[in-house]
Amino acid sequence: MAKKEVRILDKKFSEFISEIDIQNRIDEIADQINKDYEGREVFFLGVLNGSFMFAADLFRRITIDARISFIKLASYVGTSSSGEIKELIGWNEDLKNKSVIIVEDIVDTGVTLEHTVNNLIIRNVKDIRIAALLLKPDAYTKDIKIDYLGFSIPNDFVVGYGLDYDGFGRNVPSIYKLVK
Ligand code: IMP
């Protein structure tokens, strides 16, 4: 049984999306991707750190021909976005003419997503779709469509399932939200 509340550093978090609900939703997203890309090849591009768990669980359900690689970006300090993207691991794949699915843990303002999309456009990829486990619609400032979305959530800080609070909490298998 998952704990109803967890403490991470100085903050308390309460259970918000259970492990089973996350896994069921990923089943549905993977089924949809397998259908949409049937007979084609797809290149998954995960955005580290937060997406590693979602990317792994999604990728193991993919049955079409697929590759995966990761870039590492950071924009968050503590519990809010700095608005500035730091690129920590760069782009070392030739993505020209590839169908790419960007894999994001969470889309908040969308600054990180826009940065990634723009980087793919200049690499002359064939097409781009976005898979994100979570979206905060009230914080989202961009009009890039999220093609495969796990859950829309309120504008609250969340941890678990790859998402962190100052580096901690990523190992919790369900998603918890900050108790204010
Ligand atoms: P954006 O650029 O504002 O969309 O922020 C995206 C990145 O910020 C995500 O990939 C996460 O790393 C981080 N982030 C945004 N919201 C949260 C949250 O609620 N908890 C933990 N990390 C978050």
Image (spheres, helix red, strand yellow):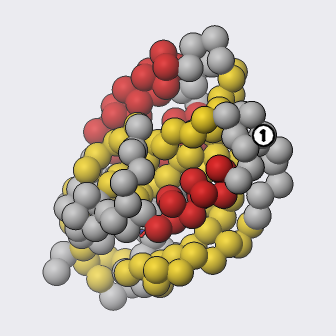
Residue 161 seen anywhere in this rendered image of the structure: no
Q: Quadrant of the C terminus?
A: bottom left
x%, y% of residue 54? 50, 46
Seen in the picture, residue 82 relative to 45 is either above or below; the reply is below
Q: Residues within 10 Å of mark 1 (few under 14, many from 20)?
A: some
Does the beta carbon at disc 1 come under 8 Å from ligand 1?
no
Seen in the picture, residue 107 relative to 93 is either above or below; the reply is below
Q: Is residue 80 left or right of residue 76?
A: left
Residue 90 seen anywhere in this rendered image of the structure: yes
x%, y% of residue 91? 77, 58
Residue at (54, 26) in percent of width and height? 61
Q: Amino acid at mark 1?
A: Lys
The residue closer to the viewer here, 1 or 15, is 15
The residue closer to the viewer here, 90 or 120, is 120
Rendered image quadrant of residue 169: bottom left
Seen in the picture, residue 88 relative to 22 is either above or below; the reply is below
Extreme-bottom residue of the structure: 10
Residue at (67, 34) in percent of width and height? 126
Determine the quadrant in which ligand 1 lies: bottom left
Q: Is residue 76 left or right of residue 140?
A: right
x%, y% of residue 10? 33, 88
Extreme-top residue of the structure: 39
* Residue highlighted by disc 1: 96
Residue at disc 1, secondary structure: loop
